Amino acid sequence: MSSPALFLDRDGVLNRERSFIKSPDELEILPGVPETLARAHDEGYRLIVVSNQSGIARELFGFEDLDRIHRKLQAHCGGLLDGIYVCPHHPTEGCEALRRSCPCRKPASGMLSRASREWDLDLGASFLVGDAPRDIHAAHALGVKAICVLGEKMPDPARWEGELPDAFVADLPEAWKHIGNSS
């Protein structure tokens, strides 16, 4: 039987946004994240991280560094993350082997599609919580409802450009309240 997913962009949703997180020491989990993920898990949602990580293509950090960062993320999230999907590519910058347009890099929906196949997800009952238009576009392309965390870096919703999310919220805990109210 298919499960709903809570797709999660990483930077700005689960952890404090920085230019590039290159080591586990730079990962700072945002307030309320572990508790919110526990509630979503208890409600039967698969917890799936989908994150562009072009710092790998740009050779700012490597796959081993990213693995250490994600082990720390998983530990801080109570081991509840079902999957962490990343796109290491960049369409115009970085090392030649990873410099390309690809179907996994958001705003494309390749990471969500792959997770859906691997976890037998009910996309129509799923949500993506992100903090950028690329997240919203990737979700809507597959019929997933999209919630935008305004956080510290996003403009006023009235000045949003591009495809609108289903809701604007302050943070992940508020996104979960919205999901509960829309079910």
Image (cartoon, helix red, strand yellow):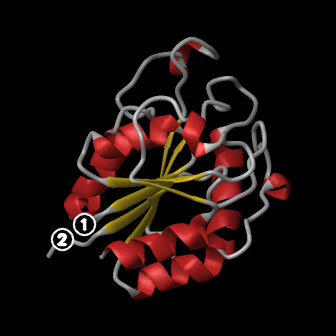
Along the viewing direction, whichever of 25 and 151 lies nearer the viewer? 151
Answer whether residue 79 is visible to the viewer in this image. Answer: no
Answer whether residue 133 is visible to the viewer in this image. Answer: yes
- Furthest residue toward front: 158
**Mark 2 or mark 1: whose residue is earlier in sequence:** 2
Q: Left or right: where does residue 152 sit relative to residue 127?
A: right
> Residue type at mark 2?
Ser
Residue occupying the point 34% across, 72% down: 182
Relative to 156, residue 28 above or below: below
- The residue where tag 2 is placed is 2
> Residue type at mark 1?
Ala
Residue 183 drawn at (x, y percent): 30, 76
Relative to 31, residue 165 above or below: above
Secondary structure at badge 1 equals helix
Residue 6 drawn at (x, y percent): 41, 65
Residue occupying the point 53% across, 76% down: 37
Relative to 8, residue 104 above or below: above
**Res 132 → quadrant:** top right
How crowded is the residue under tag 2: few (<14 C-alpha within 10 Å), some, or many (20+)? few
Q: Quadrant of the N terminus?
A: bottom left
Residue 162 drawn at (x, y percent): 44, 29
Residue occupying the point 74% across, 72% down: 31
Comparing marks 2 and 1, which lies closer to the viewer?
A: 1
Residue 125 drawn at (x, y percent): 25, 66
CA separation in Å, label 2 and label 1: 10 Å
- The residue where tag 1 is placed is 125
Secondary structure at badge 2 equals loop
Q: Left or right: where does residue 133 sit relative to residue 144?
A: right
Residue occupying the point 40% across, 35% down: 163
Residue 135: image tag: none
